[in-house]
Image: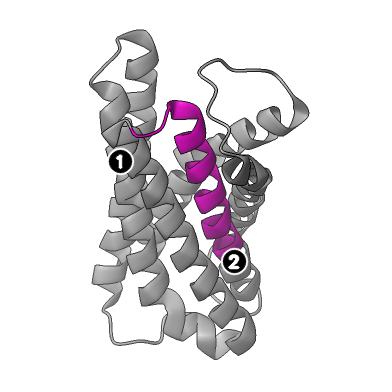
Amino acid sequence: MITNNFSSVTIGWVAIAAGIAGLLGLAFIILFFTVGQPFGTLNDICIGLTAILSVVLVWMLYPGHHAQSPLLSRFALLIALIGALVVLIGSALAISGVAGWSLAGLYMAAGNAMIGLWLLGWNYSALRGNPWPQGLLVLGLISGVVLALGLVAIPGIFRGIDTQEYVFSTVNAIWWTSSLGWLVLYPIWCVLLGRAILPK
């Protein structure tokens, strides 16, 4: 599913860079909870950087995806672009201090959920007769589903919920679970995709 003007080396390294940025975000959020600032800000920067690199990756993979699934690929491209923009808004809100971690997190969850919808579409299309490792595609589908859980954060964005204390509820538990997708599963998938694309 790579039929475009970009070399496989370029696409592979962009995928790996997106994965590394995401995994650095995971390391920084762990350090934030154990040490404190500036690791929270570094986490927010990494989340935004992952979103930017994800858009580049989506764009590079689009021609091959379009050849396989024309209608699905257009929708997936549009939703990924919107998702990355929403993630960047969340990162900017957190870094600037304009909003608290709760509202910024809702933006990040919702935006990454949209990227997750692209991930579902791409891996679903890739299942049909392409030489990708089966494990990679299964991980991509699982990651996409987990990321998509963040869609439940959208009503909270429109309501402007920005509490400084975590309140347990089913909705909160669902969108927090989605962070497993953008902090762990999706970055790992990106690294594995890059390794699968790079010439052996």
Q: Name the residue located 58 percent from the left edge and 52 percent from the top edge.
A: 113
Upstream in sequence: badge 1 or badge 2: 1
In this rendering, the answer to whether 2 lies above or below 117 is below
Between 59 and 2, the one lying in front of the other is: 59
Q: Position of residue 25 (x, y in %)?
A: 35, 34
Query: Residue at image x 72%, y 33%?
Result: 171
Indicate the position of residue 193 as horizontal and vertical percent values.
43, 59
Is residue 114 covered in magenta? yes
Tell me the magenta residue range: 98-119
Amino acid type at mark 1 = Cys
Q: Along the horizontal axis of the image, is 84 left or right of 136?
A: left
Q: Which residue is mark 2?
A: 123
Measured Cα–Cα span from mark 1 to mark 2: 24 Å
Q: Quarter of the image holding residue 194?
A: bottom left
Which residue carries the number 1 mark? 46
Query: Mark 1, mark 2: which one is toward the viewer?
Result: 1
Per the picture, the main secondary structure of the magenta-coloured stretch is: helix
Q: Nearer the viewer, residue 198 or 142?
A: 142
Q: Is residue 101 above or below residue 76?
A: above
The percent position of residue 33, horizontal first and vertical second, equals: 39, 14
Tag shown at residue 78: none
Secondary structure type for disc 2: helix
- Do we see residue 197 in this rendering? no
Q: Position of residue 146 (x, y in %)?
A: 64, 45
